[in-house]
Amino acid sequence: MNLNTDLSFLSLVANASLVVQIIMGLLLLVSFVSWTSIFSKASGLGRARRATTAFENEFWNAGDITSLYQQVSNEPGSQHTLQRIFVAGFREFLKARKSPGSDPALAMESARRAMRATLQRDLDELESSLNFLATVGSVSPYVGLFGTVWGIMNAFRGLSSVGQATLAQVAPGIAEALVATAMGLFAAIPAVIAYNRYTHEVDRLANRFETFIEEFSNILQRQLPPAAGR
């Protein structure tokens, strides 16, 4: 058993058993990927919020929805979620209303289906990597605990060959084992906080998208012939 009394972090990691070192390396890798995902998701949700607010203002200040549709549809590469919902709904509404022999009232149903399909696809994209953060937050502490248990077992196995155990002999083995738990918590806590925050932000954006769909549907409803609108 290693009797080194140097309890610095680097020394504990360097003197840990191979299994514990592998677990520590895995937790460091997971933590790095988790932080990368956290920063990436923060940036993406921030852009989504700003773009949604900007288009809501543009939509309600627009004098002609058809002109706005033509403007937005001519820039497919720069469209964000709310613009895609608007374009998909209005495109289907126009197609269904112009279709020969079709019931104009079906245009509303077509528009709603198109908008909700677009909404679902974009929500799946907004929620990407959230499952990873949830997994990191729930699994990392147990991975770290496994490393701690393994390290403690090694420490006590080493003591079996020592006639009289002292604190100086026990401390390094126990300390290096506990580092694994600390690293597991270091990976888990930010992931849990980020998951809860981002899930709430995605829900808020989803509510804004749902509200826009209902409001836009009411506008389209008023454009139907009176008989079809009833």
Image (cartoon, rainbow, N blue to C red):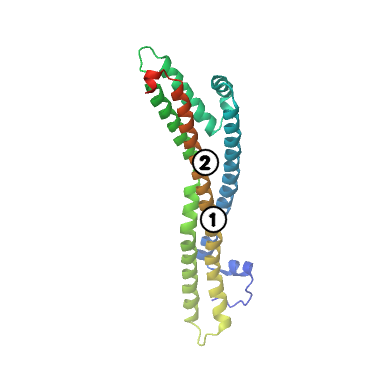
Query: What amino acid is at disc 1?
Result: Ile
Say which residue label 2 marks: 205
Percent x, y for residue 218? Answer: 46, 28
Residue 61 placement (x, y as % from top left): 60, 28
Check the picture and name the quadrant holding the N terminus.
Answer: bottom right
Tell me the element at label 1: helix
Residue for point 51% across, 39% down:
208
* 43 with respect to 134 (left or right): right
Q: Which image quarter holds the C terminus?
A: top left
Q: Can the viewer see residue 104 in this picture? A: no
Q: Earlier in the sequence, mark 1 or mark 2?
A: 1
Element type at marker 2? helix
Using the image, tell me which numbered label, if any, was put on residue 135: none
- The residue lying furthest to the bottom in this view is 164
Give the residue pinned by disc 1: 193
Residue at the top extreme of this rendering: 100
Q: Position of residue 153 (x, y in %)?
A: 46, 73
